[in-house]
Amino acid sequence: MNLYLYQNQFLPKEQVSISPDDRGYYFGDGVYEVFRVYNGNLFEPEGHYRRLEKSAREVRIPLPYSLERLHQYLTELIQANHLQEGTVYMQITRGAAPRAHPFPPTHTEPVLMAFCNEIARPKSTMEQGITAITADDIRWLRCDLKTLNLLANVMAKQHALDQGAGEVILHRNGTITECSASNFMIIKEGELFTHPANNLILHGITREVVLRLARNLDIVYHERTFTIEDLLSAEEAFISGTTVEVTPIISVDGRRIGTGRPGPVTRKLQQAFEQLING
């Protein structure tokens, strides 16, 4: 499995050549999406395309193809690589131009690149749960845009791993936002709480799915802010994301969440998610 989509061509990885003048390399000047693939099909593609379109519009990068053509390309990429379970990574940069902060000339062609990863589902961590730590959210104020500028997320994730934790829960002055690479939810008195989908968090596609499943299961949910104190007194907590699906958090900063085991509401949502991806 080594065919990449580069512009409008399918090429072996060794033949993909990105210019050193690409603004994605210089400035992180680009947007991206990571799609889950189950049973050889893109999962929730419409949500990803909607978010991609918004991110590109907000940073003023023209999409090189229509969403319909993009979908056709990604479908062909999956088929060409015989991918059944894993992810598709796609990024679009503003293009190649001499290094300068202002936008390059309008005729500069955006650069599209995508590839497949064969990744197993995280069944062990979904079953057992993971630990987490908290840290200050010092990222910029447009976290709703899925751009290539991810150094703050990378540093936060590594900080968690250095502490022996699986994820870091970010907060701004004690108000929980999200995690380094996932959205975050808690359960209090049987009801679900998650940060509003504003500029301070990424509008996760799996987050959308979880809230939809909660509605179907008659689980009351609230998109409103909550604090570290609310988290530490919660009955359950979990993260959601393209690669982590619905993964329980069993302790935070060394303090047990609820019983210290994945809780019943989280289990219900996991089961509903399982039924969804299996058709």
Image (spheres, helix red, strand yellow):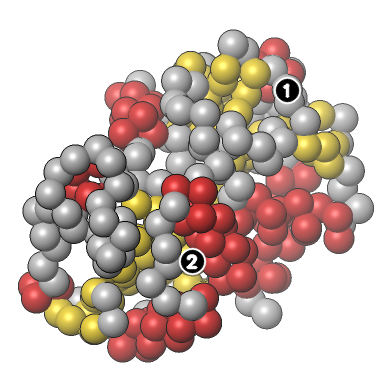
Q: Is residue 118 visible?
A: no
Q: Residue at x 45, y 48 (%)?
A: 59
* Quadrant location, the C terminus: bottom right
Q: Residue at x 77, y 31 (%)?
A: 224
Q: Amino acid at mark 1?
A: Phe
Q: Position of residue 39 (x, y in %)?
A: 51, 81
Q: Residue at x 59, y 63 (%)?
A: 50
- 94 versus 26 height, above or below: below
* Quadrant location, the N terminus: bottom left
Judging by the rendered image, the residue that carries numbered circle 2 is: 36
Residue 184 as seen in the image, left or right of residue 134: right
Q: Secondary structure at mark 2?
A: strand
Quarter of the figure with residue 208: bottom right
Circle nearer the N terminus (2, 1): 2
For label 1, count other residues whose C-alpha is less than 10 Å away and answer few (under 14), some (14-19) or many (20+).
some
Q: Secondary structure at mark 1?
A: loop
CA–CA distance between discs 2 and 1?
Answer: 29 Å
Quarter of the figure with residue 64: bottom left
Q: Residue at x 47, y 56 (%)?
A: 56
Q: Amino acid at mark 2?
A: Arg
Q: Which mark is residue 188?
A: none
Residue 150 as seen in the image, left or right of residue 188: left
Judging by the rendered image, the residue that carries numbered circle 1 is: 226
Q: Position of residue 172 (x, y in %)?
A: 57, 17
Q: Position of residue 84 (x, y in %)?
A: 42, 80
